[in-house]
Amino acid sequence: MPVLSLLFHDVYAADPRESGFASEAADRYKLSAPAFDAQLQGVARVRRDTPLLVTEPGSQNASGGRSTQDPFVITLDDGGVSYYTIVADRLEALGWRGHCFVSTDAIGSRGFLDAPQIRELDARGHVIGSHTASHPSRFSACSVDRMQQEWVRSRQALEDLLGHEVTVASVPGGSYSRTVARIALDAGLKTLFTSEPITAIRDEQGCRVLGRFTIRRGDSPDTARRLVLPAPWTRWSAWASWNAKGLVKPLLGSAYARMADVVLGGSVTRAPETTAEGTHHA
């Protein structure tokens, strides 16, 4: 069965720079706390089921009898401190839990989760997953060796911190390819989230790949509510917009890659990158 995954990058109380990556590009994906509340309350008004956790028994078969509607998933990327200070409490007030994907090189840095906070969130039932180690802005353009290092280093850091297996990840910047999934699986990751706005679950040589619908600053307060309803228009619109970018990329060539570095907000650290096949960018 399809799964509707929602992606919120970060949330802030007063200033977008208080949590997560600090750049104009990153800020465009951050919601104020009231805006985040509006999105959650909109979903809660129309859904009586709780969000799916992909680590739950039976989640391989998606709904497992939970609802007649497509199950929905809540995810946040980057590992900004707001997941601990704002997000978790709001999800738990609804009886919900979410997925927190952490860029592990940033753990303990200003604006990011520290180790005790990550352990506590894990103990409270939230899924902690990898968002690579250094958050390369164009991950699918990295060499295979770099991809392997990013996944392995990040996964190992989280497992050392939590004391249990970590098998879930999300791709930074939506920069996905089949190679990305294959290397993730080789690194021990079994479920991978992308930024492609689709509900179908793909099996890439044993790695389960799920798309996500991004909620951005300036989106209508009822965007998430409309996405989790059976009516397809909002989902189709998001998919059409995402694919329109794919038509522009070949026309802009290397200029698009330079623009993507700005739009995706860079990375924790930089390293030389080489081209990989089958690339998709956010």
Image (spheres, rainbow, N blue to C red):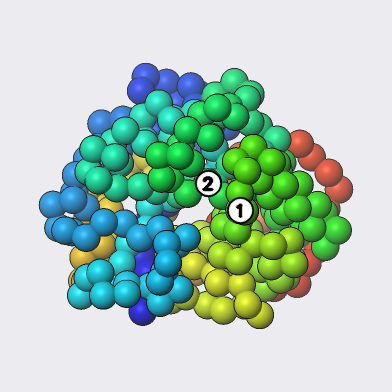
Pick the front one: 61 or 233: 61
Residue, far front:
163
Number of numbered markers: 2
The residue closer to the viewer here, 214 or 37, is 37
Q: Earlier in the sequence, mark 2 or mark 1?
A: 2
Quadrant hosting residue 218 = top left
- The residue that label 1 is drawn on is 166
Quick one: which residue is furthest to the left in this view? 45
SS for callout 2: strand
Secondary element at tag 1? loop
Image coordinates for residue 205, horizontal then vertical, percent? 66, 80
- Is 85 situated left or right of 182 in this image? left
| Quadrant position of the C terminus in the picture | bottom right
Please state which amino acid type lies under the numbered disc 1.
Answer: Val
How many neighbours does mark 2 have within 10 angstroms: few (below 14), some (14-19), or many (20 or more)? many
x then y, percent, for residue 7: 42, 51
Quarter of the picture holding the N terminus: bottom left
In-image side of 192 versus 12 (left or right): right
Q: Residue at x 64, y 37 (%)?
A: 161
Which of the 4 image quadrants contains residue 31? top left
Residue beneath disc 2 = 128
Q: Amino acid at mark 2?
A: Ile
Q: Residue at x 71, y 71 (%)?
A: 182
Q: At which x and y percent is residue 169?
A: 58, 55
Q: Are marks 2 and 1 in contact (CB under 8 Å)?
A: yes
In the rendered structure, find residue 51 and report the number of the disc placed on it: none
What's the residue at 45%, 73% (across, down)? 60
